Image (spheres, grey):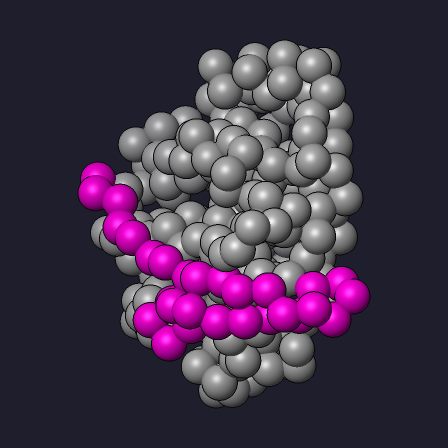
Amino acid sequence: MTRRTALAKTAAALATAGALSASLSACGSDHHADPARPASATNTTAAAPSSPSPLTPEVAGPALRVVLPTNADLASGIVISGVYDTGTYVTAEADLPAPSLPTADCTAAPAIDVDVLTGDYRAAYASEELDVAGTSLQLVVASTNHGDAAKQLAEIRDFAKRCDSFAAPDSIGASVGGTVAVDSFAGLGDEAIRIRVAAAGPNAVNYSQPEVILVRSGDKIAAVSDADHQRDEADAISAAQLLAGRLTGTQK
């Protein structure tokens, strides 16, 4: 499992994150590079089809990007980075690669994030990262072909059940125990789940323990990942609520 690059925040980071929690969106845990993922769990972005899908602009990248927060939504000091969308192309179901999560090794659990957990069925997506003083949340809004968003969340539940207890190597090859748990949120979209990885043992505090919240609205998914759910869990929930509200049209 991944050892954290820092074990504590500075007072300035705490103050800024507190201000963000009071705004429409929030910023999360200590940010560090994700560990290398096993091939079975690595997200593969589907190749764009040979022609755009002009009849479905509402599910293409630019429309999904509008759901993501902008500077006007955030408290002072928050930096938006890595903003991306897939453009006007929407990948047809026949052009998607085979899903990778059903066969992913459980040692991939410490590397879960929004990219991994939305990657199998997304036809188009937009993403960004919120940064403040070394902390970050990753955000993705994805569209899928009909019925595939529900399949994606079912996959995640199956992964959590299959990998509810596992052992993964840390940065020096030592085995570290861990657990995966999934729960549900009421009142967010058509369905909403939260998946969390927890390290076990006397040195658990030294290891990355990611959290991902996913909200499905029809055939779209809004997702927020926090590299360490023990730090700013409320901020991840706040960001997920903002995305869910915009995805369902109940919040601007």
Q: Is residue 207 above or below residue 12?
A: below
Q: Is residue 117 above or below residue 247?
A: below
Q: Nearer the viewer, residue 167 or 215?
A: 167
- Residue at 36%, 28% in the rendered image: 251
Position in image of residue 77 (x %, y %): 70, 17
Specify the quadrant of the image occupied by residue 1.
bottom right
Q: In this view, does 48 lie above or below 143?
A: below
Specify the quadrant of the image occupied by residue 65.
top right
- 38 on left or right of 98: right
Q: Which of 171 and 38 is in front in this view?
A: 171
Residue 63 is a magenta residue: no
- Residue at 55%, 84% in the rendered image: 97
Q: Which of 195 and 94 is in front in this view?
A: 195
Position in image of residue 146 (x %, y %): 33, 71
Position in image of residue 190 (x %, y %): 24, 51
The region drawn magenta spans 160-187
